[in-house]
Amino acid sequence: MSQISISTPLIGREDELDRLSGVLERARGGEARAVLVAGDAGVGKTRLLDEVMGRAAAGGMTVLTGHCVDLGDVGLPYLPFTEVLGVLAGDERFSGVVSSHPVVERLLGGGSPGDSGGRLRLFEGIAGLLADLADITPLLLVLEDLHWADQSSRDLLRFLLSRGILQRAAGGAPTHRLAVLASYRADDLHRRHPLRPLLAELVRLPAVERLELRPMGDAEVARLVRALREGPLPDTTVRRIVERAEGNAFYAEELLAATGSGDGGVPSGLADVLLIRFEQLSDTAQQVLRSAAVAGRRVEHDLLRDAVRLPEEELEAALREAIGRQVLVPGDGDTYAFRHALAREAVYADLLPGERARLHGGFARLLDGRGHRAESAAERAHHYRESHDLAPALAASLEAADHALRVGAPAEELRHLEAALDLWSAVQASERPTGEGVDRVRLMLRASGAAAHTGELHRAVSLTRAALAGVGQGADSELAALVRYTLAGNLMTVDNLTAAFAYSSEALDMIPADPPSRTWVWAAATHVLAARHVGDNETALRVARQALDRAEELGVIDAQADLLVSLAVLEGDGRRSVEGRERLRRALELARRSGNAPVEVRALFNLAIGTFESGHLDESLPWITEGLDRARRAGLLSSPYPMEMRYLHLVVLYTLGRWDDCVRAASTDAEVLPTAGGYRVAPALYVALARGDFTAADRARALLEGPFDWMATLVAGIALTEAAALRGQAEEAVERMRSTVAALTDDTGTPPHVTIRLAALALSAVADRAGDLRLKGDQEGARRWAETATELLEPARAIAVHGGVPQGPEGQAWLARAEAEWTRAVSGPDVQAWAKAVAAFDFGDVYEPARCRLRYAEALLAADRREEAAAEARGAREVFARLGAKVLLEQADELIRRGRLADAPPTASLLTAREQDVLRLLARGRSNRQIGEELFITGKTASVHVSNILAKLGAASRTEAVAVAYRAGLIAPETAADG
């Protein structure tokens, strides 16, 4: 019985597929083998076997399949083998073999094997038939769902594998070109299942092995879900399906199919499947399982005993029955768990509403009776809420939120706080918890902080806006300011910078600087950030210095640390300078003393990016490692600065040429990053493009789906401009560069710094196009592309000096490359421009200087500096080969080949001196007569020289000869441009 359709993609079973493919290969070589394929229902056994059967058929094997069917106590004997023999009897290729075994034909005719002697003859006849078939063609026999096999089929299988087909009659080595694959459901094999003893017997045979299909990994289930659905799926939907499916492909498929139902329950068809085993249990066992389902996925024995109120002997019998049927599994610490979470969900959903509330109330009171342990608060809150006892549910939710805060679990803290907010208005004021900070506005602010820490930035903004709406006219000014500067901080994380500046300004105006207060200091610290983000550095510096004095006066050392970080970025040469990084170290020490993890992580981030921007790439990695470790310990890995550090980590690995490490780290990050963090695996996209995988462009476009995200737009712009340039699509590269810059330009009209890099990438495609047109004699077309090149370079030059802040090493290098590409587009390769670009990338980058060296080699070749060109081309090629940068490796090989740079032979070895003279004039567009006049030879002689040049260059026309000569470095580009 197949549960995974053949159309379902096979994902995450590479090792199992390789193992079974090896069995097929050995079978084709004459070594018969059998594999017992085990796995829970829906885990993907049939889909794996489908793939193996397809490979076997493609490899020339004959594939025979028999299915066992659940017919209860009344089974049809030999059903799977009868199915196989029926197929054979209807195949003309094997009719002669089948007819030579009359005992088999008798089975097909519905006869009975009769006595034990007749049964033995039947078994031997089927074994002989399979052996004869294997002599004709390599054979794959697949038997599915052995857990439903009748006794006769089990006996026949035992005979075939132990005596009949895997070994010679005398017990020698396997000889037949035969493989047997038999699947069964491991979760159906209760303790007394009749298949158990047979399996134990078979796996001891030397030619039989067992292969267990484990549940798929979360990343594999996510890939499966996305592959099954055409069009985009929200990441939240994918994550929810992954969580609920628990590695089961069939469950994932069913849950995906039900995504439009909206109720979030178990799909009806899936629930029916899951409840079958439950309904086969005794009434007492069902009663125990209903209580266990209300308790949750896992329940302690003592708690379950107190809930069901059964005598110990009856409870133990019911549990033994449920475990024997593999509905429950025993766990550590005297606990029980449902074998699969969806089984628990199905049982839970089958409860009547009143029954469900009653059972929840019972568990809530039992847990309360054990004392208010912090670790049980979440359970108590859940049970009280589901039993509709709202006042204790509210108190327990707040207790659970406090516990989550103490253990550094912001996602759980947010969930409990939002539950408390939902309950707040439903609970009478007299029954609500009291105490400092326990009111609706402050709970919303706290929830917004938890949302920000867990990476739900837009949710953080929504919660803070709701808090602002809840602040009345007569509210305390400090609370009103607190709400506003919190909102400003959250708005900055979603790039709503103008609004952030407005709210931080309001917050600062609401409370006086004197006498100094903690609230004013933090409002000022937030305003400093907002002012810097909108480009008002003068205000940012003034307020930061003033606020630092107040923070020192008050002894608010975490605010001191935060303000020192801001000043390190704002003053002098910023965090790139030695002075700036020394100030950041002081800030880090203060943050550590204060215990304020978010500020500490901010300081570590700025130290990491400061060393990167100053060109000290190796020094950046330890700061990144320390920052992520601190964020992990504080439960802040999904908050903005750690997310940026993840991205920076990949950028550093990419820049250092540690591409395999980069790809591995990106793959790991992709499994844990929230939706908003998807762009942070972008350096892996750049690696994929360089290695010729242009599907990375599709992944980059996916980053542009949904609400505008500044960093996602930046990353997608880089990747898509690069992809177009590598493909030689100049129009697409230019359009992508322009649209990205337009999208990222701020409210003041200032383009982003990435404009320089985007311009360099687009200019490379533009220069290629202009050069090709110039070689073809289309001077007008080349001129138009040269004008486009100038239009692209101008904003890059402008942003390089914007605000008077000099570019760091990386920015200067990209500008040097952009200038060199512009020169190539306007007039051809320039040796000096490319030498400058190569030198500019000498700060630890690996790939980009190699790209520039390749262009430098072209320029040297055009200038007839062949030995230098050969050295540069070979050096670049070595880098591309080591990185696996397939696209530029091919370009390097092409330059070396057409430029004859492998051994750097002299130009004269290809063309004579006179032919070189003729070629230079040919490149200027001269006719044979004009060439003759300039060289003082006849037109006929010039024609002979031209013919010789075409032959030596393998060109079919004069234009093609000039193009080939240019690429081979036989003429300089300025020669071709004369005229």
Image (spheres, rainbow, N blue to C red):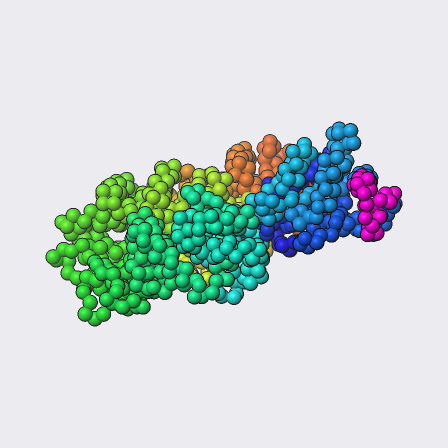
667 and 155: which is toward the camera:
155
Q: Is residue 879 left or right of residue 533?
A: right
* Residue appearing at x 21%, y 58% in the figure: 436
Query: Relative to 442, does residue 614 appear above or below in the rendering?
Result: above
* Residue appearing at x 78%, y 31% in the figure: 169
96 and 490: which is toward the camera:
96
Q: Is residue 418 left or right of residue 939?
A: left
- The question of residue 118 being in magenta is answered with yes
Principal secondary structure, stretch drawn in magenta: helix
- The question of residue 774 being in magenta is answered with no
* Residue appearing at x 72%, y 45% in the figure: 153
* Residue appearing at x 29%, y 59% in the figure: 395
Quadrant in the picture for residue 626: top left
Image location of residue 34, percent across then percent down: 69, 38
Query: How many circles with numbers are drawn on the protein?
Result: 0
Image location of residue 758, percent across then percent down: 45, 52
As drawn, which residue projects farthest toward the bottom?
A: 473
Magenta residues span 100-125
Q: Is residue 116 left or right of residue 888?
A: right
714 and 395: which is toward the camera:
395
Residue 544 can be seen in this image: yes
